[in-house]
Amino acid sequence: MRRAYNLRHVVSTSPPWSRYDRLGRLLLENRLMLEIRRLNVSIGGRKILDDCSLTVEDGEVAAIMGPNGAGKSTLAYVIAGRKDYRVESGEVILNGVDLLALEPDERAARGLFLAFQYPIEIPGVATMTFLKATLNAQRKQRGEAELSTPDFMRRVKGAAERLGIKPDMLKRALNVGFSGGEKKRMDILQMALLEPTFCILDETDSGLDIDALRVVADGVNTLRAPHRGFLVITHYQRLLDYIVPDRVHVMAEGRIVKSGGKELALELEKSGYRNYLTDPDQAVA
Amino acid sequence: MAAVQETVDRVKSIDVAEYKYGFFSDIESDKAPKGLNEEIVRFISAKKNEPSWLTEWRLDAYRRWLTMQEPKWARVDYPRIDYQDLYYYSAPKTAPGPKSLEDVDPELLKVYAKLGIPLQEQEILAGVERRVAVDAVFDSVSVVTTFKEELGKAGVIFCPISEAVHSHPELVRKYLGSVVPTTDNYFATLNSAVFSDGSFVYVPPGVRCPMELSTYFRINEQNTGQFERTLIIADKGSYVSYLEGCTAPKRDENQLHAAVVELIAHDDAEIKYSTVQNWYPGDSEGKGGIFNFVTKRGDCHGANSKISWTQVETGSAITWKYPSCILRGDNSRGEFYSIAISNGRQQVDSGTKMIHLGKNTTSRVISKGIAAGKSQNTYRGQISAHRKATGARNFTNCDSLLIGNSCGAHTVPYIESRNPSTQFEHEATTSKISEDQMFYCLQRGLSAEEATALIVNGFVRDVLQQLPMEFAVEAQKLIAISLEGSVG
């Protein structure tokens, strides 16, 4: 089913064919994971994503770098299905499934995970309760049986230990009164438990000291796997020292303006984003 | 804002959550003629074979009621109730009085089985769950009371009040109306005149009641008012935990429920009273549903006594209810924990009164109101200290949560202190489920309804923790059901 869909996709792709060389190859080899095609998105009449296209291969760690206001977080939110945005045109395909036709929770059940820049507090709901509810909700959507409590506990304990999360933190209300680092770790813990096929990390490094950054990066690195893709959004090269990407994309003014290998990140660190902006003076951030 | 708009649209288009207990059971009943007059009051009294003092007590109340006005100060709006168009007495024909389980009409047992209320003692005994003694009140009479024998061994009296009138007249006569006098208010006075049944509990000095006691109220008949009367007395140093549950069939007309509950705690005694109220709330247009006008009051009569009210209010078209404590004994303590959920066109005006009379009396009020749909949810509370209530303390916390933007939450606190040493604290918040919280939950795979239920359960957690364990689980499910259809 998935293959058939993908092939139809290739055949119907409009010229110039050459633009889709890489894409065509990936599709035929069934290695394409995420494909964003000419995505146009606005909020309150203001255009944020402007014909944005991006592909991520199976098992690839892709980084998106760019100045403030480039549309990086918007891209993450639109992929995950946040309602505030108006998708005018374009497609977002994950593993052959049209994400834009799905509700956010359905996207999650199909393996999409978004680690938030600022994880949200949910007062009164014990972290453990939340973890169990989300895990079982996803399993239910996929037609799988609920996890037994001992099974669930074992998984949580193991994952929490690896991230240096103390057991008593799991009893506290989710993210309430947690430090910035604790919140990020809790998001990575959820990522580990939910075993998504595609993870988006939205500025995971913001507000983290170097030790916390290392723990979080380690957590992400242990999750790297052949059938799990990552999209790491960041301002700074720093995070990419710890989570080394396979590809780096530069985003500016609502689209991907340059793509390359990990060396591109270092280059950006030196030259900044000025070269990619039509009016560099407008975008000091 | 898009998601909020969607929620609102959805609420507009959807019926209030399927009311699970909306079935009607065709059970033959024995009714008094419609309407209310002295003859009807005498009829009810005669049906119960009551002593003449009680008949007179009822008639006094009736005569006073005729001179009273229906209260209008609450923030609820409902059509005029025609008190002459109601039946004041209805009893299942086959069950003239409460007796042993074998004698109960199997049809009736089916009703309670359908409601998930255990009336079979053996079944409960076999299970691992904690045992609960149940008094089942169907329309105007109690149909069965379980575990009576075992409670009897501990000296605890748990029986229908109509039976207690005969078996323990001295207790009933001493305490009936001692906390809520027949002159108290319009609905309590009406109840005093026509109350048909309810539960009676007496826990002797020093006894810790060996199990939870509970009463399940069911209104079945059409156009029938339910006027039950509960009287609980905890003698010196005793303890009792009591739970009431309520359901009714789904009907297009409104049904009237005007109950009175009186609690008396003597020195060092403690009463914990929990309610899970799930009367039919009416449909999304506000058609049908129970009018719930209830007077509940506890008298912390003795020193160091304690009364704790916990309520989960999800049903009723109109709720008018203020479980209160009179803190008479020195060092006595009153508590009120409430979750009030309104959806559709429900109107809730509920809260508490803590009347501090004794020295060093303390009270604590935690109220969580959740309004969805087009409902209106009001907290109304009074905290007062008498001039002799030296060292009285109160802490009140009222939080309101709004779901959608067609509902309303209101907080009306009355705080009076006549003693300079008192310390009263009041905290209140009103919030909405934020779009951020919602999106975060959805992103992790919860559906909008699961997310709402989870967030709401978090919001009410402080109160849920006060409920006996089995009922906390029940209440949690009920909260999810009550909010079905409130999110898009």
Image (cartoon, rainbow, N blue to C red):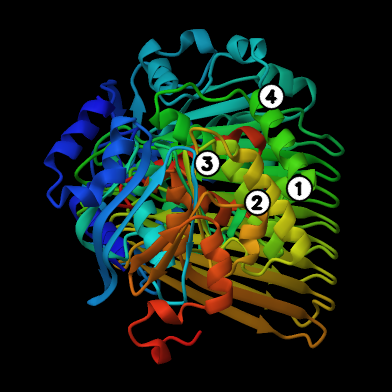
For mark 2, name the chain: A
What amino acid does circle 4 point to? Pro
Is B451 on the left-hand or right-hand side of B460? left
Q: Could you tell me if the residues under marks 1 and 2 are in contact, i.e. CB atoms within 8 Å? A: yes
Residue position for label 1: A165
Q: Which badge, 4 or 2, comes first in the chain's sequence?
A: 4
Q: Which numbered disc, 3 or 4, marks the residue closer to the eye?
A: 4
Q: Which residue is mark 4?
A: A150
Estimate the spatial distance between the alpha carbons at disc 1 and disc 2, rounded to whole Å. Answer: 8 Å
CA distance for labels 3 and 4: 23 Å
Image quadrant assignment for residue A275:
bottom left
Amino acid on which disc 1 is placed: Ile
The quarter holding residue B462 reads bottom right
Q: Is residue B488 left or right of residue B370?
A: left
Q: Secondary structure at mark 4?
A: helix
Q: In front of the other: label 1 or label 3?
A: 1
Q: CA distance from mark 1 to mark 3?
A: 29 Å
Q: Are marks 1 and 3 in contact (CB under 8 Å)?
A: no
4 or 2: mark nearer the eye: 2
Disc 4: host chain: A
The amino acid pointed to by label 2 is: Met
Which mark is on residue A186? 2
Residue flagged by tag 3: what amino acid is it?
Answer: Gln
**Disc number for residue B476:** 3
SS class, disc 3 = helix
Closer mark to the observer between disc 2 and disc 3: 2
Circles 1 and 3 on the same chain: no
> Would you say residue B199 is visible in this rendering?
no
What subunit carries mark 1? A
